[in-house]
Amino acid sequence: MLATIFCVLQISFPFAKLGYGSESISGIVQVKHHAKEDFLRIPELFTGKEYSGKYIILRSSEFRNGLYFYLPFTADYLSNIGGSKIELALIDSSLPKARVFNFSIPDNFSGQKKVLLGLTGKDWDDNKIRLVAWKIEVLGLEKESLHINQSSLWSHKK
């Protein structure tokens, strides 16, 4: 009996979804804590500017450590559908009320860059705050809703 349970767990574990991710039409939003050192790259040592590689990194403050949301679509996709703003609403363990953060997609990016939203600095204290639920909404130029991703807890009736 124990051997059967162990085999089932071994087989199903690789398919388990880790983190706070949520599925939607366009994919899974991954959520991960990052220390400021996670973003340090060799080119930055020479230029003094952060090297973001394949990402457009949008942060709530100039600090780098915090909670990051890896969006399942590229910045090119956002520009093609007319998305210029991203609104992140979340509920965390510090306050039972939703906090809202707004991010703007820059006009001057090149290539198929992935979008990374970061709550950094005072907006996210890793040691004290725990994520409860979140919703990410892409807004068009007229502030119309173009795309929504949300955690399963966000969709629960209140």
Image (tube, grey):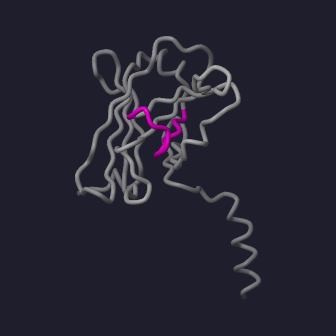
Q: Quadrant of the C terminus?
A: bottom left
* 59 in the magenta segment: no
> Where are the magenta residues, as a range?
60-72
> 38 or 16: nearer the eye?
38
Give the left or right position of residue 77, taking residue 14 as reference.
left
- Residue 51's place in the image compared with 106, above or below, is below
Residue 148 falls in image quadrant: top left
- Residue 20, percent across and down? 49, 53
Q: Locate the N terminus by quadrant.
A: bottom right
Q: Residue at x 46, y 35 (%)?
A: 117
Residue displayed at 60% across by 37% down = 39
The residue at the point 49 percent across, 48 percent down is 22
Image x and y of residue 4, in percent = 74, 81
Using the image, determine if residue 109 lies above or below residue 90.
above
| Relative height, residue 15 to residue 76 (above, below) | below
Q: Percent x, y for residue 57? A: 51, 29
Queried whether the magenta region covers residue 70, the answer comes back as yes
